[in-house]
Image (spheres, helix red, strand yellow):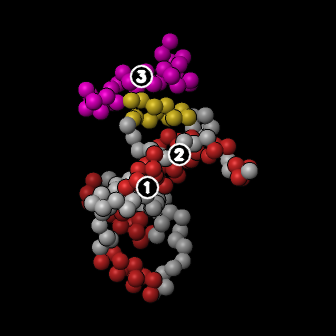
Amino acid sequence: MMNNFIATTAQHLNPSGIRRFFNLADGVEDVISLGVGEPDFVTSWAVREASIVSLEKGYTSYTPNAGLLELRKEIAHYMEQKFKVCYKPENEIIVTVGASQALDIALRTILNPGDEVIIVEPTFVTYAPLVEMAGGVPIAVQTKSENEFKIQSEQIEEAMKRISRFVSTFK
């Protein structure tokens, strides 16, 4: 009965194996779980203190969808200093809570229903579900240990042959 309230797309997603490993490692002594990407140390006092000060100053409102302009300006400055690339913080930088949210936003922005996306494996467990939730179709390409898990051009060509809109290109 609960499935009546869950989208068909979400109902057909496979459960995350990473969550199962996280649950297994939880509570076991001398085990550091990297199952959900969390470090094995407490957030530094400087970060916690800055958070407390922000709360005390009343900075408790929602930020703009793209993130605080001040932060986006700092990111643009960092990117220019570190990588010699220029981005406009007003409309070319978006702050997200992490890589998964950034990928989700990007995929939902560029994919049309049925678009096929090549995903190199092994990979992080959420990539294929993110493609599916955005209406796309993941196309897995397995890397091999004998190639140091580096993708080979032949593998991309083979995957493209499997992708419906490119089939005529290779005939």
Give 76 or 152, whichever is nearer the viewer.
152
Binning the other alpha carbons within 10 Å of mark 2 as few (below 14), some (14 to 19) or many (20 upward) gives few
Check whether the beta carbons of the residues at disc 1 and disc 3 lie within 8 A of each other: no
The residue that disc 3 covers is 157
Q: Amino acid at mark 3?
A: Glu
Q: Is label 2 in a helix, a strand or a loop?
A: loop
Q: Quadrant of residue 52?
A: bottom left
Give 3 or 59, whichever is nearer the viewer.
3
The residue that disc 1 covers is 23
Give the x, y percent position of residue 164. 56, 23
* Above/below status of 125 relative to 54: above
Give 85 or 122, whichever is nearer the viewer.
122
Check whether the beta carbons of the residues at disc 2 and disc 3 lie within 8 A of each other: no
Check whether the beta carbons of the residues at disc 2 and disc 1 lie within 8 A of each other: no
The mark that comes first in sequence, 2 or 1, is 2
* Above/below status of 166 relative to 91: above
| Left or right of 128 in this view: 34 | left
Q: Is label 1 in a helix, a strand or a loop?
A: helix
| Left or right of 60 in this view: 154 | left
Q: Is label 3 in a helix, a strand or a loop?
A: helix
Q: Is residue 147 magenta?
A: yes
Magenta stretch bounds:
143-171
Q: Is residue 43 visible?
A: yes
Q: Amino acid at mark 2?
A: Pro
